[in-house]
Image (spheres, helix red, strand yellow):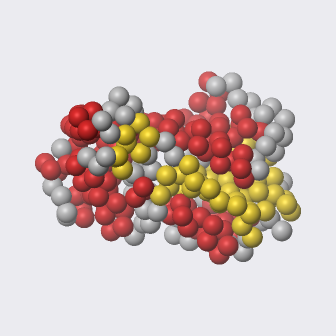
Amino acid sequence: MTDGYVMGRTSAETERLQLQARILAPHSAHLFRLAGITSGMRVLDVGCGAGDVSMLLAELVGPEGAVIGVDMNPTILESARARATDAGLTNVSYLEADLTDLRLDELVDAVVGRLILLHLEKPAATIRALSRLVRTGGVVSFQECNITRTRSVPPTPVVTRSMGWMIDALRAAGLTPDLGEQTASILRDAGLSVEGAATTGSAGSAESVMPQYLEGCARSLLPAVLAHGQVTEAEVDIDTLAERIARELKEAGAMCWSPELAAAWARVP
C-alpha cells in the first residue's frame, strides 16, 4: 500500500486529526458497541494514525482485553505510543506494517478501522486479507464518513462554498466523499455477510469547534483544492475561514453539522 494520503503529512493535519477524533469519539464508541466490540476482546485497529481509535478501543475492551494499532507511518506511531503511555493505557501496543502483508502471532477477536478505507486502492481486497487474521465468529467493522452531509442549517454561504470546494477536490483526486454509505457493500465484496449498519453525527453552533474543524479540513486539502482549479487561494482565504464561518453561523442562528459517520459490521464465518 502506497502512502497517497491526500490530506498531507503536516503538523496542522495532525492537529486536525486530533480535533476530529474528539468530535467523533462518542459516535465511534457507539458504533463499535453496536458492532459487538466488548470487554475482554483482542482488537486490531488498522490505519491507527496517532492512536485515537486505539485508545478509545482500549477503554471499551478494558484491562482484560488488548488493542493492537497498525500504521505504516513510523513518526505518527511514536506519537501514538507516547500518548498511550501518558494516558496510562497498558493494554495497547503499536505495530509498523503495510496492511497488504500484515502478519500476527495469533488471531484477534476483531479487526476495525476508522476513516482508512477512503485511502486504500482496493478496500475490499484489503478487508478480505485482514479478515483472515480474525478468529471464526470474530468481528470485522469499518467506519467512514458521508462528507456531503456536512452542512449548516439554515444554509450559510461560506460553509456551502467551502464544502463544495473540498468535495470537488476529493472527487478530482479519485476519492469517494460518501464512502460511509458504501461500507456494507465493501464488506460484502470482501466475502463477508453483513450483520448491521448505522450512522451517527453531531452539530455545533458558532461557539463550538465546528468552524475550526472545517478550517482545518480546508487547510489540509488546500493543495488539492487549488490543483482542481475551481477556486483561487485568495478566494479560499484560509487564515480567516474559521472566523467567517463562525460569523455567518452566529448571524443566521445556524447549526453546523459534522460529516455523518457510518459503519457496517460482519462476523467472520
Q: Is residue 156 left or right of residue 146?
A: left
Q: Is residue 88 left or right of residue 211?
A: right
Is residue 3 in view from this perspective? no
In percent of the image, x 77 and y 39: which residue is there?
A: 61
Q: Nearer the viewer, residue 16 or 132?
A: 16
In percent of the image, x 56 and y 49: which residue is there?
A: 200
Location of residue 65 in the rendering, given as x and y in whole percent from the top left corner: 81, 39
Q: Is residue 222 left or right of residue 205?
A: left
Q: Quadrant of residue 250?
A: top left
In percent of the image, x 35 and y 28: which residue is there?
A: 207
Q: Nearer the viewer, residue 87 or 19?
A: 19
Location of residue 133 in the rendering, given as x and y in whole percent from the top left corner: 77, 60
In percent of the image, x 26 and y 38: which residue is there?
A: 252
Q: Quadrant of residue 63?
A: top right
Location of residue 21 in the rendering, given as x and y in whole percent from the top left corner: 52, 39
268 is higher (above) or lower (below) than 208: below
Question: Which quadrant, please, contains the C terminus?
Answer: bottom right
202 is higher (above) or lower (below) than 138: above
Q: Quadrant of residue 194?
A: bottom right
208 is higher (above) or lower (below) than 136: above
